[in-house]
Image: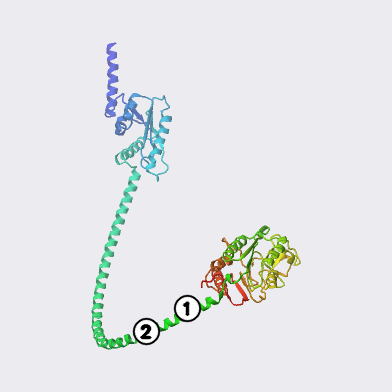
Amino acid sequence: MWQHLIRIFCFLWLGCSTSSIAQGSCGFFDPKIRFADGSSACLNAFPLLSRQGLISSSEFRDVQSVARAHSSYALAVTARPSLCPFVQFTAWNWSGQDAATALPACEKRLSEALGQYPHLKDCRCDVLIDSGRTSLNRGQFEERLKYIEQFLAEGVPAEESKRRFAEKQQREAETQRLALAQRQAAEEKRIAEERQKEKERADNELKLANAIDAERERVTAAERLRAEERRRVEDSTRLEKELAALRDKLQEADRARQSAAVANLADPSYFRNRVALVVGNSAYSGSWALRNPSNDAKAIAERLKALGFDVTLALDLKVLEIGRTLASISQKLKPGGAFVFYYAGHGIQLRNENYFPSVDADIKTQFDLPTQSLALQQVLNLADEVKSELRIIMLDACRNNPWMVASRSLSGGLAKIEAPKGTLISYATRPGSVAEDGVGQNGLYTGMLLKHLLTPNLPIESMFKRVARDVEEASRGQQEPWHEGNLRGEFAFVVNR
């Protein structure tokens, strides 16, 4: 019986020894790996699987030590280590569920690693070893480990390393090409500069010769010029004295003319009776409402009050207020006085008569207009009845006619009328033309009136000309103010004597 047992032991020992010889240093109990083609090998045949630190665990430091201790384990790694950064995760002792644990953990690590390689795509993990088995044949397995070892050595995937190397070579080649081009450009520049210097030397020699000839001619002509200069200085001195005397005479004559002109200017203080009617209609119904007339009227009223006028300010005049307003003005006007009428709002002409509709006017036909409007002729009649000496009419009333449908006889803009003697009428735009309401605090025409109204010693006709010039420039020729009439003497709103 002992002999039989000895034979069995020798048989087992011989089998183990033969296996060890076939596998190199692989022992009978060393962990092995089985490939997809059915062959197998010991894990210690692959140095990477015995690499210390591949597993960061307090219990194990390499894959082989895990395989020795646990029959159930899984190693998940980067599926394409030649292109993607290498990561791994090893799970063990999950009783056959190690792959389900290792794979998502590996994917998470790979996702974090890809932050350094934003241009890489299609990177993923797969299970390289699952409890001693792999889905690869030995050649594929060894190739996978080779790329992993290369990544651990160089820090970048193999394909990425190739790409970076190619980019480096390309940069070096580009640098060499640029350096060569720069050297060639520098040489060409040097040759061009030498040619330019040679040309400059020749030019300088020619210039020097010409300069010598010119200097001889200059010296010859200098004496003649000095003689002529002495004569010119003498003549200039004489002429300057004569011009200075003439300027003094002209300035004296100009001061005399200005004094005479100012002396002949009348201002509001010349008239004991100074009355102004200022009307601003803005609150028309619906889309025909205007923004600026009320603001314009208030500003003009304040300016006229400062000049000493008894101002009646009527804002948004209604039909029933027209008669009362005219009656009030009629009581204030005195013979020989100064009367100013300013109107801002809608204005309509009917058969060469100008009407200013009240804000509550309901004009259906041409027959409604005279009974629901303030007529310009009514205002002129008031001044004529009391024989006002000075009558200034300012009309910022050339907006579009919202009641054009009432009759074909109604026209846009205002009609040109024959100004009575002693009357000056200023229109915001040429008679028959239409102006816009404006976009600022004041209408364009009234804004320019306010600008020039207080200019000292400025005759009123000149003031209206300046207003017309500024309005035409500001509107780029679209609006052209107009004035007409015949005053008795000269008048300015402000006179400094």
Give 136 or 117, whichever is nearer the viewer. Answer: 117
Q: Position of residue 363 (x, y in %)?
A: 73, 63
Give coordinates of residue 274: x percent, y percent: 62, 68
Disc 1 or 2, which lies upstream in sequence? 2
How packed mark 2 is, by other alpha carbons closer than 10 Å (few <14, some 14-19, many 20 or more), is: few
Q: Quadrant of residue 387?
A: bottom right
Looking at the image, residue 88 lies above or below residue 229: above
In the rendered view of the protein, which quadrant contains the N terminus? top left
Q: Can you tell which quarter of the image residue 277 is in?
A: bottom right
Q: How many neighbours does mark 1 have within 10 angstroms: few (below 14), some (14-19), or many (20 or more)? A: few
Secondary element type, mark 1: helix
Under tag 2, what secondary structure? Answer: helix
Q: Looking at numbered disc 1 in the image, what kind of residue is underneath it?
A: Arg
Mark 1, residue position: 255
Tell me if residue 433 comes above or below residue 76 in the rendering: below
Determine which of the numbered discs, if any, sits on residue 390 in the image: none
Q: Is residue 333 left or right of residue 267?
A: right
Q: CA distance from mark 1 to mark 2?
A: 21 Å
Mark closer to the observer (1, 2): 1
- Image side of residue 261 versus residue 108, left or right: right
Colour scheme of this structure image? rainbow
Where, by quadrant of the figure, is residue 335 drawn? bottom right
Q: Residue 19 or 235: which is nearer the viewer?
A: 235
Residue extending farthest to the front is 272
Q: Which mark is residue 241?
A: 2
Q: Is residue 346 above or below residue 256?
A: above
What percent of the width, then of the height, locates residue 454? 54, 68
In this view, the residue in front, 109 or 402, is 402
Q: Identify residue type, mark 2.
A: Lys
